């Protein structure tokens, strides 16, 4: 194990800081970055409602649990969310204020309302991507706030500056795998990682004839596919709206491959964040490793 001698890597920033991350800009406000906090909140809210304007109550069709019936099991938080009509849908739930407001504006648990949830909408591929992207953007703003708090806490009187903002590197990797590594100074590594993710995702679209990345049909799988934001955006704009007369013979293989690509890109995002982070807080060999 490698760790920095004067910092305990197990120390977190506390539950309060973690929960604050669900409100875009709240951590920036805590840091005294008022203008940045307002921009974070406005950008996440605008992105959510740009997509919500296309899908409205269709959002409830993508929930992890039935939004109309509070589950008997599960955590009390999930039951409370369902009782108040707040859809437990990811990644929109990470942008909690906009998700809650969108739910209140379109909540209708009547039989007519539930039928509307199931009706396909024009532009729902793009709309679903945009509402999901607002949750991803909220996560990146949260990561930026957590990083700055950690930098100030552990950096002493003169906190070190990283080669690139770790949260920005993760966000760039979400859009285009490898771009975050390039930003952090590891271009060759970024090219290899980016091509690997893009190749697996392209294989998934090929085997499924472009229909693997479909949120309405494969909503749980889509959550992982969306971890490759550039790929899911391409699918939403290009392949998603294609009509499917009959299911391709290798459709399920395509769905799995696109999902694997998204999970691969999660590793890429975390690695890009870590590369940038360690440019400010390099690790040192532990005593037992030296021995």
Image (cartoon, rainbow, N blue to C red):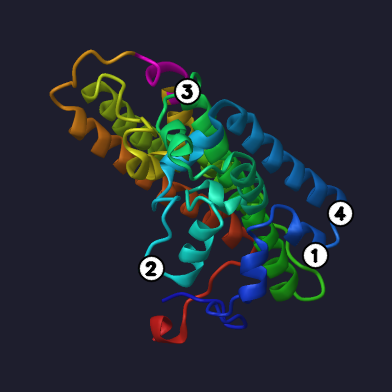
User: Residue 25: horizontal and vertical position, in percent?
Assistant: 74, 54
User: Residue 59: horizontal and vertical position, in percent?
Assistant: 50, 38
Q: Are marks 4 and 2 in contact (CB under 8 Å)?
A: no
Span shown in magenta: 236-242
Q: Is residue 188 in view?
A: no
Q: Which mark is residue 30?
A: 1
Sequence order check: which comes first, mark 4 or mark 2? 4
**Mark 1 nearby-residue class (10 Å; few <14, some 14–19, many ≥20):** some
Circle 4 or circle 2, nearest the eye: 2
Q: Are marks 3 and 4 in contact (CB under 8 Å)?
A: no
Q: Secondary structure at mark 2?
A: loop
Q: As displayed, is residue 102 above or below residue 29?
A: above
Q: Are marks 2 and 1 in contact (CB under 8 Å)?
A: no
**Mark 2 nearby-residue class (10 Å; few <14, some 14–19, many ≥20):** few
Q: CA distance from mark 3 to mark 2?
A: 31 Å
The residue nearer to you, when weighing 124 against 113, is 113
Q: Which mark is residue 74?
A: 2
Sequence order check: which comes first, mark 3 or mark 4? 4
Is 70 placed left or right of 204 in the picture? right
Is 260 placed left or right of 150 in the picture? left
Q: Residue at x 71, y 62 (%)?
A: 148
Residue denoted by label 4 = 34
User: Residue 194: horizontal and vertical position, in percent?
Assistant: 42, 36
Q: CA distance from mark 1 to mark 3?
A: 40 Å
Q: As displayed, is residue 241 above or below residue 131?
A: above
Residue 43 lies within the magenta run: no
Circle 2 or circle 1, nearest the eye: 2
Q: Which mark is residue 121?
A: 3
User: Residue 124: horizontal and vertical position, in percent?
Assistant: 48, 26
Q: Residue at x 52, y 65 (%)?
A: 80
Q: As displayed, is residue 125 above or below residue 14?
A: above
């Amino acid at each position: 194990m490698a760790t920095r001698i004067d910092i305990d890597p197990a120390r977190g920033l506390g539950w309060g800081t973690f929960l604050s991350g669900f409100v875009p800009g709240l951590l920036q406000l805590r840091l005294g970055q008022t203008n940045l906090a307002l921009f974070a909140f406005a950008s996440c809210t605008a992105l959510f409602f740009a997509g919500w304007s296309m899908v409205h109550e269709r959002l409830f069709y993508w929930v992890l649990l039935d939004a109309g019936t509070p589950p008997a099991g599960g955590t009390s938080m999930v039951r409370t969310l369902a009782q108040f009509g707040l859809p437990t849908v990811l990644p929109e739930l990470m942008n909690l204020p906009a998700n809650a407001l969108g739910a209140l504006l379109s909540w209708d648990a009547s039989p007519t309302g539930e039928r509307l949830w199931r009706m396909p909408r024009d532009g729902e591929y793009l709309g679903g991507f945009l509402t999901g992207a607002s949750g991803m953007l909220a996560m990146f703003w949260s990561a930026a706030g957590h990083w700055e708090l950690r930098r100030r806490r552990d950096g002493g009187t003169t906190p070190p500056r990283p080669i690139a903002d770790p949260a920005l590197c993760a966000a760039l990797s979400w859009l285009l795998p490898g771009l975050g590594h390039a930003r952090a100074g590891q271009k060759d590594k970024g090219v290899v990682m980016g091509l690997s993710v893009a190749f697996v995702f392209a294989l998934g679209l090929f085997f499924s004839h472009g229909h693997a990345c479909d949120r309405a049909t494969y909503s749980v799988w889509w959550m992982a596919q969306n971890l490759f934001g550039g790929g899911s955006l391409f699918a939403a704009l290009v392949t998603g709206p294609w009509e499917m007369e009959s299911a391709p013979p290798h459709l399920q293989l395509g769905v799995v491959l696109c999902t694997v690509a998204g999970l691969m890109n999660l590793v890429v995002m975390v690695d890009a964040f870590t590369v940038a982070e360690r440019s400010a807080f390099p690790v040192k060999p532990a005593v037992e490793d030296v021995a």
